[in-house]
Image (cartoon, rainbow, N blue to C red):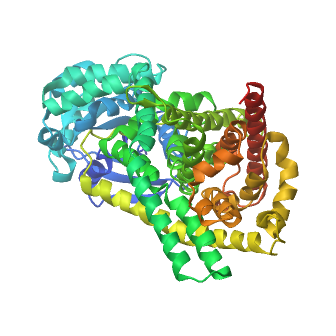
Amino acid sequence: MNPLPLVAVAGSPNAGKSALFNALTGARQKVGNYPGVTVERKSGRLQLADGRPLELVDLPGAYSLEPASPDEAVTRDVLLGQQKGERQPDALVIVLDASNLDNHLRFALQLIELGLPTIVALNMVDLAKRDGLELDPSVLERELGVPVVETVAVRRRGISELQGALDDMLAAPRCGVHESVKADIIHLQRRAREIAAAAVIRETPVRRWTHRLDSVLLHPIMGPVILAAIMFVMFQAVFAWSETPVAWIESGVAALSGLAAQIIPSSLLRSMVVDGAIAGVGAVITFLPQILILFFFILLLEGTGYMVRAAFLMDRVMHGVGLSGRAFIPLLSSFACAVPGIMATRTIDDPKDRLTTILVAPLMTCSARLPVYTLIIAAFIPNTRLAWGVGLQGLVMFGLYVTGIAGALLAAFVLRRGVLKGGGGGFMMELPKYQWPAAKDVAIGLLTRVEIFLKRAGTIILGTTILLWALASFPQARPGESQVDASIAGKIASGIEVVVRPIGFNHDIALALLPAMAAREVAVSAIATVYSIDSSDETAAATKLEDRLQGRWSLATALAFLAWFVFAPQCISTIAVTRRETNGWKWPLFMVSYLFVLAYCAAGLTYWTAVSLGL
């Protein structure tokens, strides 16, 4: 007995493929898994007009015949007749989203080149018309060389016409003809855009402007230049826009410190409140405006639809160092915090690709480093205006972020050619429409960041600061002796100083390094707490932290400290989540070790270079 004709329904994700499959087969469906994999197999029966039955199989959505996930691998294997327990389809129904035609046509061109009898279902034409796009299916037929049927699957429009086309196709198979499927992705995308543009009868100015913007923002030369310019402006704004709110917060912290000193009698309690809690936590809270400005830009870029386009711009660079394009989003998340960035690597299917992304994520400059960068830059880099709207401090901040990104890419390059040998693959994502971000969404995002920051300041930073205050306050110093030097913290710092003295670090930095492992911002609160304890009078205690640093550190030491924090091992939370995501201590220890070596070498190289230049 001859098997029933097998017709595969294929297309990119979100094309309405499953809705079309359900409309064609109704309740006559079977669901199971493909042999050997946990990918769902959905098949159903369809009765043609002349009574002949055929079997329809709904393939997992894919962007390319070069798979980037198990679902896409199954789709490729079925279409090529290489899937175990599955025969090659006798014909294809390719489902396209009419409102996203150029992106979906790229995969359709590959499918048609397979040489199977093919019908194209131009789906969701109602939504396309609602958005101001009207297409000519006859042009698509001419360009693709296969029948094209307009459908609205969710409303069963065009289903009978599609069944009729299936009947005709099985009676007289018709295959499309066009350029080779072996063409690279850029060539396919160009051809897809040409076909989509030719099929347009009418479209709104908004859609035309989207294409014009993309032609500039995604240009191989202009695109990266614009991305770099946006980042540059963002870091200039971190300093230029924050001066006034930072001054307000500093005044508030100073007033609170003075009030506490008046209310609480001279005692260890007053020292703990003023020198510990207020000085330490207040030094970190001062940098809240810079963090909010940074996240304001990030939220704007996400809300406008530009952030996904930035991922596409970086895809070629990522691929060049052995990372998958899918790694971009987790690394981008790591600019906020490495913890959610590492958790986001769960979307990466290749184990070595995912592990590489986890190991380099801490090198992306998280927001916790921003208070450290801002403090040192404000203290040692002059607020010089280089050109209109361009300040030296913002330029240095931009350079630190770029150095972190370059370090992550270099580390990935080395790892993918060493212990995690392999190469990254490209990735596909739908490009969202350009739009003005909703003010409410931006406000909620900023309020959420404030909540997270203040919660962190009131728990981890406060707790670590109080612990450091206690270690720095006992035992009490003898007359004429520095309290910090005599304390337990001072003795611990003296031991650490032996290791870090060759790279230009002093006793103050040695004392701040250990508590900074709890959270990056604690380095600032640790320095503020120690200086507050060691202040001999209220005037010294009221001196700005930046001014005190200038009197105790050389410029070479300050630059080395910045270099250390670009590469330094991450906080305990990052180490813990790495251990959880890798199911053991092997890779977290490896990560901490290589980051420590990188940080030590970078700080040493920076220090001795600065000294040789007379800094």
Relative to 222, is 3 above or below?
below
Residue at x-position 39% and y-position 54%: 245
- Residue 194, image x and y in percent? 28, 19
Relative to 403, is 613 above or below?
above
Relative to 90, is 342 above or below?
below
Residue 62 makes an appearance in the image: no
- Quarter of the image for the N terminus: give it: top left
Observer-nearest of 544 and 309: 544
Residue at x-position 64% and y-position 76%: 272
- Quarter of the image for the C terminus: give it: top right
Residue at x-position 82% and y-position 71%: 477
Observer-nearest of 50 and 402: 402
Observer-nearest of 60 and 246: 246
Q: Horizontally, is 278 left or right of 452 in the view?
A: right
Residue at x-position 49% and y-position 54%: 287
- Residue 501, image x and y in percent? 84, 45
Most extreme residue toward the top is 179
